[in-house]
Amino acid sequence: MLGALLLAAAACEPAPPAPVANQIAAIDGADPAPPAPAVTSAAIAGAPMAQWLVGAWSYDTSCATDFILRYNADGTLQNGEDSGRWVLDGDIVSETISERFEMGSDAPVKLDPPEKRTYSLERIDAGKGSLTFKGKKIPIQRC
């Protein structure tokens, strides 16, 4: 009886609040948990590897860099000064870069024709992976 009362009381308590940000864990010295990707595209929702890829990534060993690669759930991307669209087919990421900020410019420059890049994607764990471009393996870390 007491056990049932405790279970009932526990069920009425509100769930603990979600972590404010991954940066707090980093300040404490703990490894932050990777954020859950927000899935908005039907193509991404049906592909676990694409769901994993959605989010912010660093080519550096930490996320304290200004150069962040961001794959958005709507199929857009921001890769440093480049922006455009991305698709994933199996383990192949294809990027179409349509705009680029150039040094000294106030607005992005439209690329005509757009620049196309293709990478092989490897998932190592929830927060680490690699992109292989022209035979060179580039580690990525979730931010």
Image (cartoon, rainbow, N blue to C red):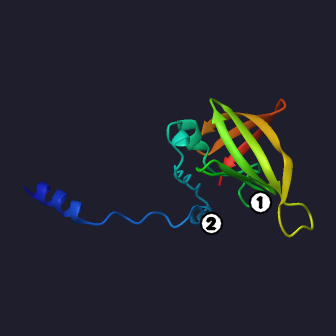
Q: Quadrant of residue 30?
A: bottom right
Looking at the rendered structure, the secondary structure element under dot 2 is helix
Nearer to me, 86 or 58: 86
The residue under the point 54% across, 54% down is 35
x, y percentage for residue 18? 44, 63
Pointer 1 local density, CA inside 10 Å: few below 14, some 14–19, many at least 20: few
Q: Which mark is residue 92?
A: none
SS for tag 1? loop
Left or right, 76 with reference to 16:
right
Q: Position of residue 138 (x, y in %)?
A: 78, 39
Residue at the location (56% across, 52% down)?
A: 34
Residue to which mark 1 is pinned:
65
**Mark on residue 27?**
2
Residue at position x 22%, y 60% in the image: 11
**Rounded to the nearest whole Å, what is the CA distance between mark 1 and mark 2?**
16 Å
Amino acid carrying label 1: it is: Thr
Q: Amino acid at mark 2?
A: Ile
